[in-house]
Image (cartoon, coloured by chain):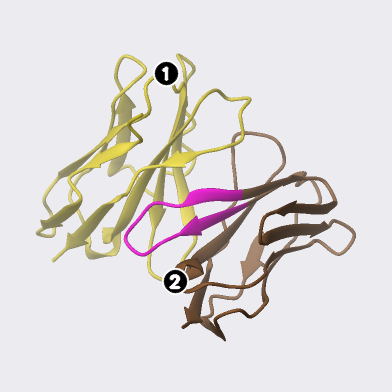
């Protein structure tokens, strides 16, 4: 079993839809949870950062962590064509190592 | 300010040749990572440098891979006797310090071994 599992997609949604992107993980030591966004032919960029369980909101984006079920989610409200990218989850136990998921490719159709 | 830069952006090489990939991290960032991203795979950790500490080389897939970081700044990833399975995008990232959490990624070097 991989430490981090993520559906590769692609996930296609119409503009304005609410998008739910998810990861599961197996290591209960993970305390820090990142979401990175990667546009085609670019390096990933940090989108959201959450510590431990709970929700964090930033504009149209909400990150949610449920440590009891080892499940992390990223919600995008009012999705835009510019949100079309690959989204990678990256949990960490607090050391310098982050375990990246394979990424979910999202397409928002205008 | 300037972000992380990598060169070359694309590299096509013949099987068996050696290649060098370069990373210029953000000035003042003490931590530097190399990752490999293959189609359908996540980012695979290769090596980590932090200041003057011994690097964590635990992710290097074979002894054909090596990396160095000179003067705490520029880093070079070298792949000797390249194989077709080495074809991937090689990404470099830097962090301000080991205590910070955000990694800043470069655009990557797309390596194709023919």
Whole-number angstrom distance, CA of label 1 to CA of label 2: 33 Å
Name the subunit of mark 1. B
The answer to which quarter of the image holds residue B29 is top left
Is B52 above or below relative to B84?
above
> Residue B78: percent from the left, percent from the top?
24, 39
The answer to which quarter of the image holds residue B10 is bottom left
Task: Give the left or right position of residue B51, taking residue B100 as reference.
Answer: left
Is A40 above or below relative to A58?
below
> Residue A43: percent from the left, percent from the top?
39, 51
Residue position for label 2: B40
Q: Residue at x 46, y 83 (%)?
A: A110
Residue position for label 1: B28
Q: Relative to the observer, which residue lies in front, B93 or B54?
A: B93
The verdict on residue A12 being magenta is: no
Magenta-drawn segment? A35-47
Q: Relative to the observer, which residue lies in front, A28 or A19?
A: A19
Is B54 above or below relative to A84?
above
Residue B48 image label: none
Instruction: Sort mark 1 into few (<14), some (14-19) or many (20+) by Cα contacts within 10 Å.
Output: few
Asked which secondary structure carries label 1, the reply is: loop
Q: Which chain is yellow?
A: B
Asked which secondary structure carries label 2, the reply is: loop
Instruction: Sort mark 2 into few (<14), some (14-19) or many (20+) by Cα contacts within 10 Å.
Output: few
* Image quadrant containing the N terminus of chain A: bottom right
Task: Give the left or right position of residue A92, taking residue A71 as reference.
Answer: left
Q: Which chain is brown?
A: A
Q: Residue at x 15, y 54 (%)?
A: B11
Name the subunit of mark 2. B
- Residue B78 in view: no
Q: Residue at x 82, y 46 (%)?
A: A52
- The answer to whether dots 1 and 2 both sit on one chain is yes
* Callout 1–callout 2 Cβ contact below 8 Å: no
């Amino acid at each position: 079993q991989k430490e981090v599992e993520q559906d590769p997609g692609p996930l296609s949604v119409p503009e304005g839809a609410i998008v739910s992107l998810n990861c599961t993980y197996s290591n209960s030591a993970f305390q820090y949870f990142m979401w990175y966004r990667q546009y085609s032919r670019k390096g990933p960029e940090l989108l959201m950062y959450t510590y431990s369980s709970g929700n964090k909101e930033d504009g149209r984006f909400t990150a949610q962590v449920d440590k009891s079920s080892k499940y992390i989610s990223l919600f995008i409200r009012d999705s835009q064509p510019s949100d079309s990218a690959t989204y990678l989850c990256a949990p960490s136990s607090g050391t310098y190592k982050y375990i990246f998921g394979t990424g979910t490719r999202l397409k928002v159709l205008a | 300010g300037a972000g992380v830069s990598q060169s070359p952006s694309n590299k096509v090489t013949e099987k068996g040749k050696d290649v060098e990939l370069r990373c210029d991290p953000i000035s003042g960032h003490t931590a530097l990572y190399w990752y490999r991203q293959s189609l359908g795979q996540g980012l695979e950790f290769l090596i980590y440098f932090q200041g003057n500490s011994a690097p964590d080389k635990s992710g290097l897939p074979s002894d054909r891979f090596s990396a160095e970081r000179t003067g705490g700044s520029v880093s070079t990833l070298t792949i000797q006797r390249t194989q077709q399975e080495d074809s991937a995008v090689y990404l470099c990232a830097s962090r301000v310090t080991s205590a910070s959490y955000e990694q800043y990624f470069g655009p990557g070097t797309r390596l194709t071994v023919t």
